[in-house]
């Protein structure tokens, strides 16, 4: 396993981060524990979760993913060996069951942090992230910015950082991060930082062969401001594993169970997948290996968040940490990207 420094810290995190959002819906507590055991044995020291998980969100399971991690910490006694990331959920119709106040107010942040700490059975979270912007903007697969809806939000970067800073002072949080954020939003938080306001260190956004929109705007912010990308959906909801090719619907697979997650199911996406599949095959790689190895070595990526519903998938995903693509393969990837640029968002 290879490691990178969490930007602005002396903390080293594994190139592969273990994503956990299926635990509690598609995976049982024991299966989650088995994944953490295996990942840890392979050198993965970075776990990512959220108060919202598991996904798709429902009131009856909300917080179960964090609870599973908490019971693993208690059983394994490995809390001090893991860099743990979690998130506070923002305003959305599907978060009303979490808190009546779904803004990033001080009260909401206080409640979210305290509840996550209890579920996780720990007294600190290494990286605490805002799961998505409080303001209406273009995230979660939405192209373009809605000017009318954008007028409904009033700037509060300083207030949010002040509320989070109190938890940094208490030792509840070590570092801060963003998620599903735009270049403008990232710069807003960076500009609001100061001696009494912590600086954000990471941004967790989707990034894959089917969605390289991070490279437009956010990549330069990441490079010049030292805000590392934690890439999520590197396999595009499993589409880049190839298991859905030619209309196949595997039993118990995410898109079979939850077909409304169709962000990566368009005809352009399907066409691009076939081209990437052929490229992988011609270079003795699986499509999964090609897709994850590409994300792993991008210069702005601090860690690649992989997710799996079984150990076979997990082993292949973690194994990509040792695969480095040749310049010829990277050139071929870019040729495909130029012909079908960002078929999804």
Image (cartoon, rainbow, N blue to C red):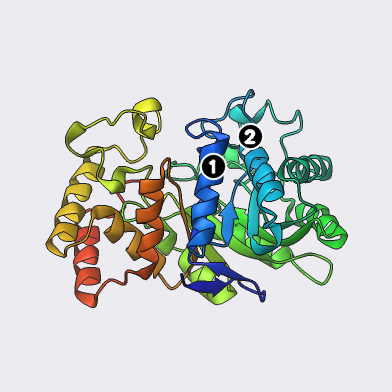
Query: What residue is at 70 percent from the left and 30 percent from the top?
Result: 98
Occupied quadrant, residue 170: bottom right
Residue in the image at 17% along x and 63% along y: 284
In this view, 286 is above or below 330? above
Residue bearing the label numbered 2: 64
Instruction: Locate residue 43 relative to residue 97 in the image: left or right.
Output: left
Look at 31% across and 51% down and name the residue there: 210
- Quarter of the rendering containing residue 258: top left
The percent coordinates of residue 192 (x first, y second) are 73, 64
Question: Which numbered dot is residue 32?
Answer: 1
Name the one closer to the observer, 156 or 337: 337
User: How many marks are shown on the rendered structure?
Assistant: 2
Relative to 109, is 94 on the left or the right? left
Q: Which element type, helix, strand or loop, lies under badge 1?
A: helix
In-image side of 195 versus 335 (left or right): right
- Residue 87 position within the rendered picture, expressed as x and y whole percent measured from the top left: 65, 47
Q: Position of residue 95 (x, y in %)?
A: 64, 31
The residue nearer to you, when weighing 188 against 226, is: 226
The answer to whether residue 101 is visible is yes
Q: Is residue 125 above or below residue 192?
A: above
Sequence order check, earlier mark of 1 and 2: 1
Label 2 CA crowd tier, 10 Å (few <14, some 14–19, many 20+): many
Give the label, 1 or 2, closer to the camera. Answer: 1
User: How far apart, in angstroms, are the residues tagged by discs 1 and 2?
Assistant: 11 Å
Residue closer to the observer: 225 or 10: 10
Q: Which mark is residue 261?
A: none
Secondary structure of the residue carrying numbered label 2: helix
- Expressed as whole percent of the image width and height from the top left, the position of residue 100 reads 76, 28
Q: Where 303 sits versus 36, above or below?
A: below
Residue 108 in which image quadrant = top right
């Amino acid at each position: 396993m290879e490691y990178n420094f969490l930007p602005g810290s002396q903390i080293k995190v594994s190139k592969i981060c273990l994503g956990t959002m299926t635990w509690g819906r598609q995976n049982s507590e024991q299966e989650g524990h088995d994944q953490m055991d295996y990942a840890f044995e392979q050198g993965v020291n970075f776990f990512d979760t959220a108060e919202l998980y598991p996904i798709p969100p429902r009131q009856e399971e909300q917080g179960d993913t964090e609870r599973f991690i908490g019971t693993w910490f208690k059983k394994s006694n490995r809390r001090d060996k893991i860099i743990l990331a979690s998130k506070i959920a923002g305003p959305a119709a599907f978060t009303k069951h979490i808190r009546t106040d779904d803004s990033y107010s001080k009260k909401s942040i206080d409640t979210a942090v305290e509840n996550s700490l209890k579920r996780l059975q720990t007294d600190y979270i290494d990286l605490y992230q805002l799961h998505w912007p409080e303001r209406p903007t273009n995230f979660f697969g939405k192209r373009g910015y809605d000017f009318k809806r954008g007028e409904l939000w009033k700037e509060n970067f300083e207030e949010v950082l002040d509320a989070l800073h109190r938890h940094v002072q208490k030792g509840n949080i070590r570092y801060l991060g963003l998620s599903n954020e735009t270049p403008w939003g990232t710069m807003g938080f960076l500009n609001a930082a100061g001696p009494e306001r912590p600086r954000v260190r990471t941004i967790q956004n989707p990034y894959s062969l089917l969605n390289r929109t991070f490279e437009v705007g956010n990549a330069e912010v990441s490079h010049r401001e030292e805000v590392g990308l934690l890439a999520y959906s590197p396999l595009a909801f499993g589409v880049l594993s190839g298991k859905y090719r030619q209309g196949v619907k595997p039993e118990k697979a995410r898109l079979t169970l939850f077909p409304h997650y169709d962000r990566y199911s368009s005809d352009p996406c399907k066409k691009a997948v076939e081209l990437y599949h052929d490229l992988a095959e011609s270079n003795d790689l699986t499509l999964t290996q090609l897709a994850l190895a590409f994300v792993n070595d991008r210069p702005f990526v601090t860690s690649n968040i992989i997710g799996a519903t079984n150990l076979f998938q997990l082993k292949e995903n973690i194994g990509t940490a040792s695969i480095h693509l040749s310049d010829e393969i990277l050139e071929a990837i870019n040729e495909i990207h130029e012909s079908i640029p960002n078929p999804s968002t």
